[in-house]
Image (cartoon, rainbow, N blue to C red):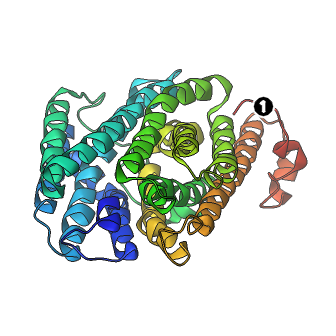
Amino acid sequence: MAQYSTNKEPIKASHLELGLVGGLSISQALLVSPIVTMVRRRIGTRWTLLIGTLLLFTSLLAASFASKVWHLVLTQGLCFGWGMGFAYVTASALLPPWFSSRRSLAVGLATAGSGIGGSMYSLVADRVIRAWGLGWAYRVLAFAALSANLPASFLVRDLHPKPRDVAPGGIRSSSFDPRDFGRVEVFLIVAWGFATELGYIILLYSLPVYAASVGLTPAQGSAANALLNLGLAVGRPPLGYFSDTFGRISVAGVTTLLCAVFCFALWIPAQSFAPLLVFALVAGMLCGTFWCVITPVLVEVVGIAKFANTFGVICIGLVVPTTFAEPIAMRLVRGNANSNRAFIQAQLFAGLMFLVGSLCLWLLRCWKIFTDAERRGESVTALERQHRHWASWVSPQMLFSTQRV
């Protein structure tokens, strides 16, 4: 998308339209998550992953022949998003049941692969574009995705290959209940994801365009984007380790808050190549917190039995921010996108969203501490439980508790 935005390519489209294409590629993956869960239960993990692999390959190959913006919407937006949904959502659900004590570290190591792949994609795509053009870059990436995902589809193993029977009155992991949005813990997690995804998508897609706005070359913009992805790869395993050690919700809240601080303190002043690289690396280590810890945090909050169902609910809740995050950023760009201060409003907006996300996690931490204490019978008596206020868990005692959560 940065290539279309900053160079004279056959497709003529506004920054807003190109931003929408990038947003669709992620939001569609979340939108199809309930369908992916049902398909996986019917045909198994391997065939579900193979469907995702085929869709990803087809989308990138077809995008190489795109000549109008609606071609990109269909290929890189819709088809790629559906492929990522079948591949990524399925893979995300495989890992948590295998681990208990070191679940966050395991997820961190696994999700680091997306950062490594993103770094390689940025650098390889830039080289191929300069040597052979944008069409061939899409084709190279299509075959790279096929060569990586096809063997992985055959090698992964599910802890429970066949769905277990559910007792009467139990929760089926494939069911989707909109009423789950009314649960406090689910609402706070969705709010956390809603806010941080707005900031994360802006960072992920805007960095090369921002680099061009401060006078850097496309190669330097690709290098900054590659370093952001490298930060994702480097930061996620330690993030998983510290989550297991100091508490998953607490660590997620601290890292989300730090990402807001670095957006304000490092990104806004970054007007040259070196400061931008520093910000890209540091932000990359922190901005992917949501997708690194969402599975262990969910298991911590709702339990392994309700994990798949709640994960599908949360994915649906994140469709709107992932679709419109980049168009919002492009709309906030003031005047000429090539002005070195054009991105100031988008930068402030991204930092503010990470700040809101950290507040949601602070409240989630309070709720978790309160419910744990209530379960142990420490917080309220039976009479108090009947007359408590609906928000009684928001108290100074819970807000400033040092309990590991």
What residue would you read off at disc 1?
403
Residue 121 located left or right of residue 101: left
> Could you say where residue 61 lies in the image, as x and y percent from the top left?
11, 55
Give the left or right position of residue 28, taking residue 195 as reference. left
Q: Nearer the viewer, residue 155 or 326?
A: 326
Question: Closer to the camera, 38 or 89?
Answer: 89
Give the vertical position of 146 relative to 395 (above or below): above
Q: Relative to 348, is 312 on the left or the right?
A: left
Task: Kindly tell me whether residue 169 is visible in this rendering.
Answer: no
- In which quarter of the view is residue 160 placed? top left
Q: Residue 398 placed where, x, y %?
A: 83, 44
Q: What type is the residue that disc 1 sits on?
A: Gln
- The residue lying at 18 percent from left, 75 percent from top is 68
Which part of the image, by quadrant, shows the N terminus? bottom left
Q: Is residue 374 visible?
A: yes
Circle 1: element type: loop
Residue at 51% in and 21% down = 102
Q: Where residue 297 sits in the image (x, y, percent)?
A: 56, 39
- Which of 263/92 is in front? 263
